[in-house]
Image (spheres, grey):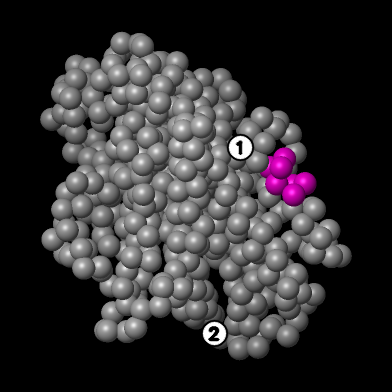
Amino acid sequence: MPMLPTSIESFSPERVEGGQWKPQLAQRTHPRHGMPSFSWMAPFLPSFFTGPTNNDTNSNEKQRQRARPTAYLDGLRGFAALLVYWGHHQLWAHDGTGEGKAFELAYGYDNKYYFASLPGVRTLFAGGHFAVSVFFVLSGYVLSMKPLGCIQDGDYAELGKSLSSAVFRRWFRLYIPVICTTLCYMTFLHLFRIRTIPELQGSYFSELWNWYAEFKNFSFVLRTGGEPWFTYNFHAWSIPVEYRGSLAVYTAALAFARFGRNARLIGEVALVVYFLYIADGAHFAMFIAGMLLRDLDLLAMRNDLPGFFRRLEPFKSAIMTLLFYVSLYLGGVPSHTDNLQQLRDSPGWYLLSFLKPQAVFDYKWFYLFWAAVFLVSCTTHLQWLKTFFAAPFNQYLGRISFAFYLVHGPVLWILGDRLYAAVGFVRDSHAQNCPWWINRLPLPTFGPFGLEVNFLVPQLILLPLTLWLAEVTTRLVDEPAVRLSQRLYQEALDD
């Protein structure tokens, strides 16, 4: 997942694009209950065992929340990362039973009626693509904060500095965590000779060369062919999209910098229309739509919205509530295949299927575009949604979301695969990869589809382990990657 800064609001002030943003480090926490403090252990301690520092009082925490009025977007990003985790585990565990595809089909399709497939409910079980779409819209929103602020202020010198810093640092910020996590995963597989995804090369050095050959192409921004997947972490497919989408936002900001208000908004809308209806670029449309939402929010803060929006003000609550429910429905678009006929055969989707533009190859991204844009938009204006995403657990997920996205796959493939085999979710590959684990501890399949006992029990191990590993990765990889990119940029300026 993509792929955003550790804190959305901390990314927005001027000090960020100037290379001065410094995320709060886990090493600054102190163990609770008077436990002795060992600095080398601090990065490996889960937050449960760490308390606030002397300066991190409840009063200061409240002040920080007031100073970060968009903290709820951190929570939205974190909750979306949890949906990615949950969806991948659901699909992986149920694949061997032959029922896994039901999560990606409409309620009632092929006369299958599962609670988990109900509109809206299915997002909680298989909302991974919806979550990634939310990531992309949020990225467009966040990355355009400083540039749009400079544009509306007419500060073009600061805009140039901001874009220079952002473009230089973006590759490092996105790909260093991918490099570190995939190298560690590959090394772990060879060290313990674990059979899983991917199939190992004959030697570690052969594996290292294969990793390098794949990664250099995978991370090349101008590549136009080849598989979109990275063998050492399939879920990282979104990182190159994130990088290209970031450049689209920066380029659009530069292109529209000297436009007037209305011309700039029209330009942003025109880009969305182009990417969505003329070119097969729904992902880029998500980034630009996020930029458009941020532009409108900044104009609203300045009381400078076009008259059309001011006339809608009395109906804002009703409109946003409606958009929320539409978002939930569209976010559950059937996506088992990219066959449009299957969508038309899905109950509740026949008429909607005719809205798909000719340019969009994989139809789900068209519907997910609208779902993600509506969700981000209505979250900004519905207080109860803000409150939910500002909850401490969602804020915690937001802080570790990038690492959570990167490490949940390796945990699933190494440990999750074996635990699912042990409790009765057997796949064809288990006979070769982990025969000892098959039905080692069979548990009952009692419970609703997607919430069976033998699915939930492994989560008692898998979810805490994945969250802990994400915390460690955030402290040892993600935050240092941010600082390194800033330092490289500053040293280049000082040369």
Q: Which of the 4 image quarters holds residue 171?
A: top right
Q: Could you say whether the residue bearing mark 2 is in a helix, strand or loop?
A: loop
For the residue pair 84 and 374, the one nearer the viewer reads as: 84
* Mark number displayed over residue 362: 1
Residue 347 visible, this angle: no
Q: Say left or right for 39 vs 50.
A: right
Position of 454 relative to 159 (above/below): below
Say few, some or many: other residues with alpha carbon within 10 Å of mark 1 (under 14 / 14 to 19 / 20 or more).
Answer: some
Mark closer to the observer (2, 1)? 1
Q: Position of residue 331 (x, y in %)?
A: 44, 46
Q: Is residue 225 visible?
A: yes
- Magenta segment boundaries in residue numbering: 212-218
Q: Is residue 259 magenta?
A: no
Q: Identify the residue at image location x=17%, y=49%.
A: 66
Percent across and percent down for residue 161 are 40, 26
Which amino acid lies under the numbered mark 1 shown in the image of this protein? Asp
For the residues marked 2 and 1, what is the alpha-carbon distance in whole angstroms? Answer: 38 Å
Nearest to the observer: residue 48 or residue 427: 48
Residue in view at x 58 percent, y 46 percent: 175
Residue 34's x, y, as percent? 27, 84
Q: Residue furthest toward the front?
A: 495
Residue wearing tag 2: 444
Of all residues, the one furthest to the right in this rendering is 202
Q: What type of secondary structure mainly makes up the magenta span?
A: helix
Callout 2–callout 1 Cβ contact below 8 Å: no
Q: Residue at x 69, y 83 (%)?
A: 437
For the residue marked with disc 2, what is the amino acid? Pro
Q: Which of these two is toward me, 363 or 238?
A: 238
User: Which image quadrant is residue 312 in?
Assistant: top left
Residue placed at 60% from the left, 87% from the top?
442
